[in-house]
């Protein structure tokens, strides 16, 4: 918000006030000195002029006082005329007193009655020279008492008294001072106007620069400061405009980099979190919010350690001094697993000062799952191969130690060895099939097949196997009456059906019934196999299609299973764009479902 500057707080006022004060001080100093010198010069010149005239008058009067050819009356008349000729506008009174103290003449018309009488001025009694200023009726006067010498100069024959009006000179000086003061006021007023104009010429470009700076602070770089001249302010304005252009360019570059960074962060498959040096979150991208299941407004400003829930095991200093990657398990249940790998890196300035941390979040749930499955797979393969190999080694060692000579034991040992060999061969073949399926090299040989007849063919084979096994079971069929033609790979689907039916027979009780159903939905055919066995525990339902997984390991191994049948079945059905799943309740049997894509056709289409 722009704050208004009052006039008395502005630079205009301060410049004008400073200039006026300096001007007044200069005028006062110059005026005081000038008036004092004027007064001194004027008064001194006036006194010297009066003194000179008085001395000359005293000399003239001395000659007239001693004339012998004239009587006293003529002499006094001559003296009076001389005084009248001497007295000017500034002379108040000129008086002549002889050596006997008798007033012989005076220029004051109002005091002609004292002529011929005794002098009444005390200053004239001792006939000594005197010069002094005095006050007469509130007016300053200058009194000059000059002894009158005889023409020979050896005798004082009288005294001349002259009183001059010096007040006029002082009034002239006062008038001159008044004129000087008036001129100073006029000069001060003109100076104020000129100063304000000059100050405005200085402050206006500065004000425009301030306005432009405010616009720049708001992000508006379109304005330019007007250049009024080639002086320092003009150069400053040009520099300010160049600075504005540089800032605009830098801002555009930073904005482009920020947009690029935001775009990169927004489209990254990894989460990114940046903090300040106190460990407070300042930036977080959408992927990090998704991985941590938090909201932006709840995270900004919070502690990174609390956000990642690692404050009990790590400190901010440890992360700054020894940044390392850590794994964070955010799983809420076995079905909803989430494992995140966090990599830390320090944010440093060129000086080496640490300003914060950047941590990158990688979702490694699938990698950890694959790694775990790989370890389990290696362990299971090792275990499954080691068991028959150990058994074969034992029998072969027994045979090599002489059991081959026993006609009752040797054939049995050889049969066991052959069975274990066949079992390993089946396992290796199954692993090779799975490997080809995983790599996508196992192409399907698709053809349209009557799915009803294909299933009946497989079931008929299992019906014939009842007599050759030691377990009694019955297979019940509940099929749709309509022929269902499905595009599939016959050999691989038969392999899937064999796996599911073999499992149903293995885990069904003696004398139990196996129910097979075939039905048609809108876009799929669904085949299901239901047994009356022990069922599958709920915790194992999602794992029965995993490789080498067995609910009852001892029984499955005793019956020669490899633990790969259902895993192969799942990959085959997935390659057909179908689905396979199981429903089961422990103690009540299980039902396996196979769903394959199906498009109904019209009879005449085949014809």
Image: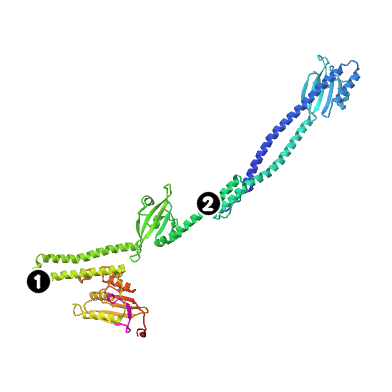
Vertical side of 443 occupied by 9: above or below = above
Residue 488 forms part of the magenta stretch? yes
- Give the mark, 1 or 2, whose residue is nearer the N terminus: 2
**What residue do we see at 71% from left, 39% from top?**
184
Q: Nearer the viewer, mark 1 or mark 2?
A: 2
Q: Which residue is mark 1?
A: 408
Task: Say which of 160 and 371 sits in front.
Answer: 371
Identify the element where label 2 is drawn. helix
Task: Say which of 503 and 421 sits in front.
Answer: 421
Task: Say which of 535 and 232 sits in front.
Answer: 232
Q: Quadrant of residue 48?
A: top right
**What residue do we see at 51% from left, 54% from top?**
251
Identify the element where label 1 is drawn. loop
Q: Quadrant of residue 503?
A: bottom left
**How many numbered marks does the figure carry?**
2
Q: Which residue is mark 2?
A: 246
User: In the image, 133: left or right of 452?
Assistant: right
Q: Quadrant of residue 500?
A: bottom left
Residue 467 is tagged as: none
- Residue 241 visible? The answer is yes
**What residue do we see at 73% from left, 31% from top?**
38
Vertical side of 485 occupied by 442: above or below = above
Task: Say which of 119 and 512 sits in front.
Answer: 512
- Residue 552 visible? The answer is no
In percent of width and height, residue 248 lies at: 53, 54
In percent of width and height, residue 575 lies at: 32, 72
In percent of width and height, residue 300 lies at: 45, 57
Q: Residues within 10 Å of mark 2 (few under 14, many from 20)?
A: few
User: In the image, 446: left or right of 297?
Assistant: left
In percent of width and height, residue 347 lies at: 41, 51
In this picture, which residue range is highlighted in magenta?
Answer: 478-492
Residue 580 forms part of the magenta stretch? no
């Amino acid at each position: 918000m722009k704050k208004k500057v009052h006039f008395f707080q502005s630079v205009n006022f301060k410049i004008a006030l400073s200039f006026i004060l300096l001007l007044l001080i200069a005028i006062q100093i110059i005026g005081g000195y000038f008036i004092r010198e004027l007064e001194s010069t004027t008064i001194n010149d006036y006194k010297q002029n009066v003194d000179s005239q008085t001395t000359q008058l005293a000399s003239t009067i001395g000659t007239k006082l001693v004339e012998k050819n004239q009587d006293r009356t003529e002499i006094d008349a001559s003296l009076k005329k001389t005084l009248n000729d001497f007295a000017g506008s500034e002379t108040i009174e000129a008086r002549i007193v002889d050596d006997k103290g008798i007033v012989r003449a005076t220029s004051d018309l109002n005091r002609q009655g004292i002529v011929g009488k005794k002098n009444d001025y005390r200053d004239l009694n001792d006939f000594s020279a005197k010069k002094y200023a005095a006050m007469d009726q509130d007016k300053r006067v200058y009194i000059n008492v000059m002894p009158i010498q005889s023409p020979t100069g050896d005798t004082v024959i009288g005294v001349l008294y002259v009183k001059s009006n010096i007040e006029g000179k002082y009034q002239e000086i006062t008038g001159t001072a008044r004129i000087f003061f008036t001129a100073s006021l006029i000069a001060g007023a003109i100076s104020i106007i000129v100063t304000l104009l000059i100050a405005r010429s200085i402050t206006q470009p500065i004000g425009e620069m301030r306005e432009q700076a405010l616009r720049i602070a708001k992000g508006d770089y379109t304005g330019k400061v007007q250049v009024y001249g080639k002086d320092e302010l003009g150069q400053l304005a040009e520099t300010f405009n160049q600075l504005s252009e540089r800032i605009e360019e830098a801002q555009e570059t930073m904005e482009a980099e920020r947009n690029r960074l935001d775009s990169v962060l927004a489209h990254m498959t990894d989460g990114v979190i940046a903090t300040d040096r106190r460990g407070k979150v300042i930036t977080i991208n959408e992927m990090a919010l998704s991985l941590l299941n938090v909201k932006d407004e709840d995270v900004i400003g919070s502690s990174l350690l609390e956000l990642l829930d690692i404050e009990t095991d790590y400190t901010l200093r440890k992360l700054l001094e020894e940044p390392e990657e850590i794994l964070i398990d955010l799983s809420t249940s076995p079905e909803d697993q989430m494992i995140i790998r966090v990599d830390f890196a320090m944010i440093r300035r060129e000086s080496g000062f640490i300003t914060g941390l950047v941590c990158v979040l990688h979702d490694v749930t699938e990698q950890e799952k694959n790694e775990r499955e790989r370890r389990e797979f290696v362990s299971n393969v090792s275990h499954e191969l080691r068991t028959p190999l150990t058994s074969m080694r034992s029998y072969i060692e027994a045979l090599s130690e002489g059991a081959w000579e026993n006609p009752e034991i040797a054939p049995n040992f050889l049969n066991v060895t052959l069975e274990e060999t066949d079992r390993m061969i089946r396992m290796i073949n199954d692993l090779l099939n799975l490997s080809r399926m995983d790599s996508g090299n196992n192409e399907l040989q698709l053809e349209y097949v009557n799915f009803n007849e294909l299933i009946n063919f497989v079931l008929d084979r299992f019906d014939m196997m009842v007599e050759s096994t030691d377990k009694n079971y019955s297979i019940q069929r509940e099929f749709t009456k309509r022929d269902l033609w499905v595009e599939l790979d016959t050999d691989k689907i038969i392999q899937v059906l064999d796996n599911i039916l073999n499992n149903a027979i293995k885990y069904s009780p003696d004398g139990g019934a196996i129910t097979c159903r075939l039905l048609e939905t809108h876009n799929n055919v669904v085949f299901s196999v239901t047994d009356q066995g022990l069922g599958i525990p709920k915790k194992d339902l999602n794992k029965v299609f995993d490789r080498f997984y067995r609910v009852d390991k001892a029984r499955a191994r005793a019956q020669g299973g490899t633990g790969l049948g259902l895993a192969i079945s799942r990959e085959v059905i997935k390659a057909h764009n179908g689905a396979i799943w199981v429903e089961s309740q422990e103690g009540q049997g299980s039902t396996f479902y196979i769903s394959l894509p199906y498009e109904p056709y019209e009879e005449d289409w085949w014809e």
